[in-house]
Image: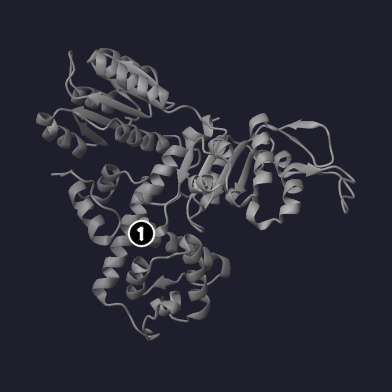
């Protein structure tokens, strides 16, 4: 099980401090509330925290003083998020320039603060720095931040999203975060791809002689996934009769094989997924309401590519690197015209369609720079001559974009750390990111 994220709350206001501590504990954090600077220093010296949330003004000291002390006294200063009044915003911005992560102004959105802290804590709890992230967009990083907490607390998760967005990949990350060990199985089954008369035996197993052709007993996917994770894709395609049987298994956490009479207990993380609107199906009578509430304990929505376009160049880079490594050929690049095309195309098939387009272009085009008509022949783009070269300005812009994207990835998207490594200011980095399509500056934030 993943450890609970550790948060140090430094707040001398008893009402706010108690409220923050209670909320973070309800969210699954290990929250330690320090009512003054002295106790905060003791706590930070005794225990490693993933995030520190500190008021700027305290009775016996300031948040800035604790921030400076942590830099000198601790082996590694944890990320700091400051709570400040409107009059001290300039001071908070100055602290960000010196390495603080962020600040919120009173009154602040508590949900947004929790999400921000969860994202920071997820970076500290990443079990393997070599694990490829789900994406570089804010939406996918929010999902990534949720995963450790869900994996440690939930036993049923529903993933929704259009076909091809990567729901199984999110399920695999949940499985990996739930605990170490190769012996923990991950079993995936597409409920919509199995004939109705075979689905029950596939899910729950069967005994020898249970039906014609059952020449031996066989464990179903629930038993196969015992101790690990079962991923039921397209759960919305099940018949109402099968939904009743699935509901019983989820409630009782035990299965009975077809043709058998012995209940077999199963303990696993159940991850269901669908591209359909289950709530609408409930209203129309196509999905059982009681099953809906059983599988929809915690929901993760994976947005389509058109809602997270900053992931498109990042995904293409990985697909091209994978293809080059697999085929032993030089790594291909996109023509500047293709870069613009992939960002404007809606990608109705999402990540699956994007991968197929890149693979097809690498096969059909002999050009060093893949043109847009090779990636998206159905979109009607004009062909680009094979010997065409990108203008020098476009080439230099692409080099800068790739270099900054690589730096952001290596720091987990931490703007302050990335700017320091690149030798530029945070404001300069934000401006470059916006110009190069690597992300937007947060609304309402001016980094002077």
Q: Is residue 245 left or right of residue 89?
A: right
Q: Quadrant of the C terminus?
A: top left
Vertically, is 284 above or below 112? below
Q: SS at mark 1?
A: loop
- Name the residue: 31% across, 77% down: 390
Residue 130, percent from left and from top:
49, 47
Residue 204, relative to residue 389: is it above or below? above
Q: Is residue 16 above or below residue 401?
A: above
Residue 374 spot, x, y in % from top left: 44, 78
Asked whether residue 41 is in view, the answer is: no
Image-based side of 218 in relation to 353, left or right: right
Residue 132: x and y in percent read: 48, 50
Which residue is rendered at x = 37% and y = 48% of the image? 139
Relative depth, front residue between 370 and 99: 370
The percent coordinates of residue 417 (x first, y second) are: 29, 43
Q: Is residue 380 above or below residue 352?
A: below
Residue on which disc 1 sits: 309
């Amino acid at each position: 099980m993943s450890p609970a994220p550790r948060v140090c709350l430094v707040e001398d206001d008893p009402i706010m401090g108690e409220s923050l501590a209670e909320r973070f504990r309800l969210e699954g954090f290990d929250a330690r509330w320090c009512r003054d600077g002295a106790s905060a220093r003791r706590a930070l010296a005794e225990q490693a925290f993933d995030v520190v949330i500190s008021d700027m003004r305290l009775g016996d000291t300031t948040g800035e003083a604790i921030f400076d002390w942590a830099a000198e006294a601790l082996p590694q200063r944890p990320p700091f998020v400051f709570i400040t009044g409107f009059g001290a915003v300039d001071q908070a911005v100055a602290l960000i320039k010196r390495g603080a992560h962020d600040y919120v102004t009173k009154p602040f959105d508590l949900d947004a603060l929790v999400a921000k802290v969860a994202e920071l804590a997820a970076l500290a709890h990443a079990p393997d720095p070599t694990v490829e992230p789900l994406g570089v967009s804010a939406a996918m990083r929010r999902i990534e931040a949720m995963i450790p907490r869900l994996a440690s607390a939930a036993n049923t998760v529903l993933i929704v999203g259009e076909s091809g967005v990567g729901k199984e990949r999110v399920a695999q990350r949940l499985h990996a975060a739930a605990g170490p060990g190769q012996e923990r199985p991950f079993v995936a089954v597409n409920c919509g791809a199995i004939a109705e008369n075979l689905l029950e035996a596939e899910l729950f197993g069967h005994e020898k002689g249970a039906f014609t052709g059952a020449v031996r007993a066989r464990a179903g996917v629930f038993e196969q996934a015992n101790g690990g994770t079962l991923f039921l894709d397209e759960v919305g395609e099940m018949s109402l009769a099968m939904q009743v049987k699935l509901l019983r298994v989820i409630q009782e956490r035990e299965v009975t094989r077809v043709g058998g009479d012995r209940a077999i207990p199963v303990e696993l993380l159940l991850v269901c997924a669908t591209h359909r609107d289950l709530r609408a199906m409930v209203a129309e009578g196509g999905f059982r309401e009681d099953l809906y509430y059983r599988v929809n304990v915690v929901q993760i929505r994976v947005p389509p590519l058109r809602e997270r376009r900053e992931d498109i160049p990042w995904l293409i880079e990985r697909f091209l690197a994978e293809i080059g490594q697999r085929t032993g050929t030089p790594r291909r690049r996109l023509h500047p015209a293709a870069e613009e095309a992939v960002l404007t195309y809606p990608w109705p098939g999402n990540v699956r369609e994007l991968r197929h387009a890149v693979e097809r272009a690498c096969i059909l085009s002999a050009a060093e720079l893949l043109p847009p008509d090779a990636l998206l022949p159905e979109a009607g783009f004009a062909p680009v001559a094979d010997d065409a070269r990108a203008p020098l300005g476009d080439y230099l812009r692409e080099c800068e974009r790739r270099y900054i994207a690589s730096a952001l990835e290596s720091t987990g998207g931490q703007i302050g750390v990335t700017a320091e490594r690149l030798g530029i200011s945070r404001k300069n980095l934000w401006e470059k990111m916006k110009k190069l399509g690597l992300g937007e500056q947060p609304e309402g934030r001016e980094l002077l």
